[in-house]
Image (cartoon, helix red, strand yellow):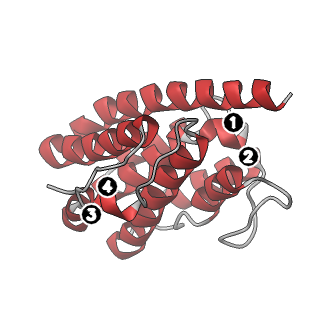
Amino acid sequence: MSLVELIGQADERGLAASGLACLDRCVPLLGGDDEILRPLWAELADDTGDAWGERLEQVRAKLGTVGEPGAEEPGADEAVALAHRMLADAPASRSAGELRAWADACSVAALRIHRLLDPLGGTSPVDAPREGRTEGVSPLVAAELRRQTKVLELLAAHGPSGLRPALDVSTEGRRVLRAVVSRRSRRRA
């Protein structure tokens, strides 16, 4: 099943986890530590989701992404701007409609970020791999695509008990992106 189909079939928790996992893997671009999104992951385990909006605002304040959705850091490169947009555009409520649009946008943004940061580049637009066509996809983008798919499959198959393994998948991806960002910074210096 393609990533687009998985997002289309995901429930509210799966959609929130999908968007959050994409954002979590991109935290190195936001300057956050590995624990910055833990309150949001914990909130996904709660069936009511009552504190999602409050916890989201706390994370935005800590990462300096407060204000209008879509706000970007002036002068930031495209990858950093995309990561900030993912956080800024996160919906304050856990409604399936808003989460589906956010999860889909986060999926595209995370794949674009990985394509921008991959030193080997790639020729495929990000929509093609999301629909199952992976010709010309760079290794970093292919790995991100696998992680996005795995998160949605875990939540679909295991419900709330799939959150822990989904977080593990995201943590692995964050480590990879942190290494890529570090190498990129050394090359620029």
Q: What kind of residue is marked 2?
A: Leu
In the rendered image, the quadrant that contains the C terminus is top right
**In terms of depth relative to the viewer, which is nearer, 166 or 78?**
78
| First-in-chain label (4 vs 1) | 1
| First-in-chain label (3 vs 2) | 3
**SS category of the residue bearing label 3:** helix
Q: Which mark is residue 4?
A: 3
**Is residue 182 visible in this depiction of the protein?**
yes
Q: Position of residue 49 (x, y in %)?
A: 41, 57
Task: Measure the C-alpha gap from mark 1 to mark 3.
Answer: 29 Å
Residue 179 found in image quarter = top right
- Label 4, on which residue? 129
Q: Which mark is residue 165?
A: none
Q: Position of residue 121 (x, y in %)?
A: 53, 43
Q: What's the residue at 42%, 56% (across, down)?
A: 107
| First-in-chain label (1 vs 3) | 3
Q: Position of residue 1 (x, y in %)?
A: 14, 55
| First-in-chain label (4 vs 2) | 2
Residue 166 found in image quarter = top left
- Assess whether mark 1 and mark 2 are in contact (beta carbons under 8 angstroms): yes
Residue 161 found in image quarter = top left
| First-in-chain label (2 vs 1) | 1
Q: What kind of residue is marked 1?
A: Gly
- Label 1, on which residue? 32
Q: What's the residue at 23%, 60% (across, down)?
A: 10
- Label 2, on which residue? 63
Mark 4 Cα within 10 Å, few/some/many (few <14, many 20+)? Answer: many
